[in-house]
Image (cartoon, helix red, strand yellow):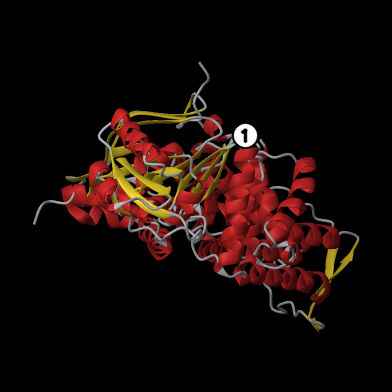
């Protein structure tokens, strides 16, 4: 266990030594400070009586027709949490991939991989320690931002919205899925740039795949099954956004398929990457 | 029978290159050798001879195409085989954001060295390699020589029974080189085995008890330096002056070696086909009242020997 822990620690420290991760941490802290001090909720007997943002009173619409939804305490909490969850999902994951994309390629650099593999540690352990280290670092950062937001909003409002916590797991899980692509390209090409291009490319493709219902029927007898094939095989990063925001809004998720198929993609790619890493010569 | 530190049998490695792996390069062709415990073993060969591939197979970095490689009787493919080894690669890279001390703790952890042992050994080793005053300095600011010394400390963290050194004196100044050489000899004295891969033949000649020369992926010579560099049946004799007639009778000739410091002594070269012929020459000298100071079998330098062996493999022009 000691070598595995050492590897985990090395990856963790290497990631935290990167300025972009420090930047993410600072931005997350600023968001949490803003939620703590700049957003004032005036809660009286469980109802929202007033809301001040940066000292300014938030105006409630005066001509709201009777029967239309009013700005409630829950809706404010949900809105703040949904914005943070959406930002953490898109901006957070894109920046985290950028920050971590060089780690696996660097690990395999001549002069470094020799030192590592000459230790009494198996190659499977090397992959496991690396992956766990990256997940742990990004997980802590995500937990800090999203968990902190949830805690602050819950304490301030008294609205404890536990389903939001699931969205934290999904953000970490989807980072893990996209990081699998980074690792595969890392073991194949040792190129950080290519690893980043492919992972971002998959996110771009997922935007197109999100419209599968409308696009696929237009592609003819050959194109349609190919498109659906890609939809089922590749990660559905864009569609999972819907699951994250639904959970953040305390709603009911209609289909978990985009998430499960993405996780299966991640699992398959991690397995393939590990096999390749074990078999290759350095 | 005691298990050898390193045992390699019929080891071959073919690299596949090109987009579809259709081109092949044979790096090793049926290499077999053994390195006994407590030896300092030198692996020599020209560039592209297969030295690096052999070392990498022994360290589990490269998978052999055929044959077996064992460290202390355990297959080199098993992580367990690497429990008792230390390794200093030629161009190693440490994470630059760590200090020297943090680096040693990290690599000690990877080598499964307990925290208690690391607390004791890390300062000792930093002191031993002359980096005690740099323990808190980030590795990215280190010179090549300092990195080499830190690499050596890293290789010694687990108190290895077998130490692999790949060009250990590369980029190191003469003082550091001497320190590394002394350290290698210390390792041998403590009973450890050292496997040295170096182009600096003068260094190899000073410390190695056994060498092997690889050429085109095959072991072409293997033995002690004395055995390999001895020129067969040629001796340098240091004696009192010998008359011209006796020189003619015995077949002795003046040696190109420098004359000894004592003015009454001269150096002669004797060619004797066998031991009786050598003794016959000595008898004739003694009968003529020539006093013999010393008899030394003639040796070539390791560098001359190495170049001859490498040249043997070159196609005739």
Q: Quadrant of residue A71?
A: bottom right
Identified at 17% across, 48% down, the residue is A222
Q: Nearer the viewer, residue A56 or B262?
A: B262
Q: Nearer the viewer, residue B140 or B196?
A: B196
Q: Looking at this rendering, what residue extends furthest in the left direction? A: B317
For the residue labelled by badge 1, is the local secondary structure a helix, a strand or a loop? Answer: loop
| Residue B298 horizontal/vertical position (percent) | 36, 46
| Residue B44 horizontal/vertical position (percent) | 37, 47
Identified at 75% across, 45% down, the residue is B118
Q: Looking at this rendering, what residue extends furthest in the top direction? A: B1
Q: Nearer the viewer, residue A209 or A246?
A: A209
What subunit carries mark 1? B
Q: Nearer the viewer, residue B13 or B210?
A: B210
Identified at 79% across, 46% down, the residue is B120
- Image quarter where the C terminus of chain B lies is bottom left
| Residue receiving disc 1 | B191
Identified at 49% across, 23% down, the residue is B73
Q: Is residue A62 positioned above or below B133 on the image?
A: below
């Amino acid at each position: 266990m000691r070598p595995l822990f050492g590897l985990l620690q090395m990856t963790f420290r290497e990631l935290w030594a990167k300025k972009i991760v420090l930047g993410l941490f600072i931005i997350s802290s600023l968001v949490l400070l803003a939620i703590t001090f700049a957003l004032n909720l005036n809660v009286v007997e469980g109802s929202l009586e007033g809301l001040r943002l940066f000292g300014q009173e938030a105006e409630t619409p005066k001509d709201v027709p009777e029967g239309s939804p009013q700005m409630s305490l829950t809706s404010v909490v949900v809105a703040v949490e949904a914005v943070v969850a959406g930002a953490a999902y898109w901006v957070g994951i894109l920046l985290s991939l950028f920050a971590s994309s060089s780690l696996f390629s660097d690990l395999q650099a001549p002069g470094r991989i020799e030192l590592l593999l000459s230790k009494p540690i198996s190659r499977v352990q090397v992959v496991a320690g690396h992956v766990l280290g990256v997940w742990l670092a990004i997980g802590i950062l995500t937990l800090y931002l999203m968990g902190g937001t949830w805690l602050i909003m819950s304490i301030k409002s008294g609205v404890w919205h536990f389903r939001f916590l699931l969205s934290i797991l999904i953000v970490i899980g989807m980072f893990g899925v996209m990081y699998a692509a980074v690792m595969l390209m890392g073991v194949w090409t040792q190129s950080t740039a290519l690893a980043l291009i492919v992972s971002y490319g998959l996110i771009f493709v997922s935007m197109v795949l999100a419209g599968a219902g409308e696009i696929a029927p237009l592609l003819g007898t050959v194109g349609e099954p190919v498109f659906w094939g890609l939809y089922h095989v590749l990660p559905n990063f864009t569609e999972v956004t819907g699951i994250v925001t639904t959970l953040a809004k305390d709603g009911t998720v209609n289909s978990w398929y985009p998430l499960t198929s993405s996780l299966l993609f991640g699992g398959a790619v991690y397995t393939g990457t590990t096999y390749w890493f074990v078999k290759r010569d350095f | 029978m005691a298990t050898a530190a390193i045992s390699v049998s019929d080891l071959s490695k073919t690299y596949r290159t090109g987009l579809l792996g259709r081109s092949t390069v044979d790096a090793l062709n049926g290499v077999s050798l053994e390195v006994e415990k407590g030896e300092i073993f030198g692996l020599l060969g020209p560039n592209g001879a297969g030295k690096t591939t052999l070392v990498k197979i022994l360290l589990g970095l490269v998978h052999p195409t055929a044959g077996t490689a064992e460290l202390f009787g355990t297959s080199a493919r098993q992580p367990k085989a690497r429990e008792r080894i230390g390794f200093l690669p030629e161009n190693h890279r440490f994470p630059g954001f760590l200090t020297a001390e943090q680096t040693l703790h990290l690599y000690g952890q990877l080598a499964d060295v307990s925290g208690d042992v690391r607390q004791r050994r890390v300062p000792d080793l930093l002191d031993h390699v002359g980096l005690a005053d740099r323990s808190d300095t980030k590795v990215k600011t280190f010179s090549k020589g300092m990195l080499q010394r830190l690499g050596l400390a890293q290789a010694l963290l687990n108190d290895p029974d077998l130490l692999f050194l790949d060009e250990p004196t590369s980029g190191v100044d003469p003082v550091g080189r001497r320190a590394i050489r002394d350290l290698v000899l210390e390792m041998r004295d403590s009973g450890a085995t050292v496997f040295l891969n170096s182009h600096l033949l003068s260094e190899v000649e000073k410390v190695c008890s056994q060498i092997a020369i690889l050429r085109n992926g095959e072991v072409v010579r293997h033995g002690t330096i004395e055995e390999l560099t001895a020129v067969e049946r040629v001796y340098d004799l240091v004696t009192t002056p010998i008359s011209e007639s006796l020189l003619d009778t015995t077949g002795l000739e003046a040696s190109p070696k420098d004359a000894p410091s004592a003015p009454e002594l001269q150096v002669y070269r004797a060619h004797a086909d066998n031991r009786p012929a050598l003794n016959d020459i000595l008898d004739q000298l003694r009968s003529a009242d020539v006093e013999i100071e010393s008899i030394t079998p003639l040796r070539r330098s390791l560098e001359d020997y190495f170049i001859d062996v490498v040249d043997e493999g070159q196609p005739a022009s």
